[in-house]
Amino acid sequence: MWTIRFEHEFIKYPGVTEEQITCFLTTWNKDLSGQEINEIKERQVNPFPKSSPYFDQYKPLDPTGWKLPQRAFPDSYIDFMKYSNGGEFQNGERYFQFFDTEIFREMNFAYEMPEYMPFAVSFAMDGSGNHYLFDMREAARNNEYPILIAHSGNLGYEDCTLAAISFMELCTERWELC
């Protein structure tokens, strides 16, 4: 049961039902469908003008082999989803725009997470283009994963930052900007 109270609850939605959570947990990380692969491929556009020397070097991403981690979410995250299926909250300077179960998978593929950060799973953003991600490269410790923060325009493990050692710490720590 979720007992954490955020300083600010800007948008709180009804929590997921048992049926919704069961469906979500069995579908969020399934293989890409043919339709999803085609949609991702159609979004691939050469960013360089034809006059650029880089135009001919551009190679669109191939999502065919993309996989989301086959790991379970922390109980704390599932408890949060039962409290609010998505929403916007704040503690200290940490602002959260949590994905709901309907857009969760879509957001991870829209930002091409399996390409740039395999085994990282984006579950929220901070309102400034940064993703909060479960780092699932290693097995959970005490049913929790480290939480990373990475900017949408520079996704990669080498440029991300450790935000918290668990989902609970992320949501409760009163981080303040200097």
Image: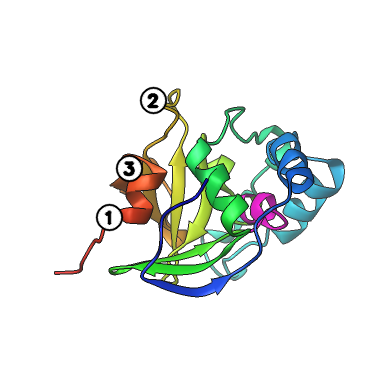
**Image quarter for residue 92?**
bottom left
Q: Secondary structure at mark 2?
A: loop
Question: Within 10 Å of the Cα at label 1, are there few (<14), some (14-19), or many (20+) other Cα atoms?
Answer: some
x then y, percent, for residue 106: 69, 54
Q: Which residue is mark 2?
A: 141
Q: For the C terminus, which image quadrant?
A: bottom left
> Could you tell me if the residues under marks 1 and 3 are in contact, i.e. CB atoms within 8 Å?
no
Residue mark closest to the camera, 2 vs 3: 2
Q: Is residue 103 in the magenta section? A: yes
Local SS, label 1: loop
- Residue 117 visible to the viewer: no
Name the residue located 31 percent from the left edge and 39 percent from the top edge.
Answer: 165
| Location of residue 105 with respect to 151 vertically, above or below | above
Percent across and percent down for residue 6 are: 40, 65
The tag earlier along the polypeptide, 1 or 3, is 3
- Name which residue type carries label 3: Glu
Relative to 64, does residue 109 appear above or below in the rendering?
below
Q: Are marks 2 and 3 in contact (CB under 8 Å)?
A: no
Look at label 1 and name its amino acid.
Glu
In-front residue for pair 135/11: 11
Distance (Cα) linking label 2 and label 3: 22 Å
What's the magenta region?
A: 100-108
Q: Which residue is mark 3?
A: 158
Q: Nearer the viewer, residue 46 or 152?
A: 152
- Helix, strand or loop for disc 3: helix
What separation in Å lies between label 2 and label 1 (alpha carbons)? 19 Å
Position of residue 105 measured from the top left corner of the image (x, y, whole percent) = 67, 49
Instruction: Tell me the residue at 62%/27% (across/down).
Output: 70
| In front: label 1 or label 3 | 1
Q: Which residue is mark 1?
A: 173
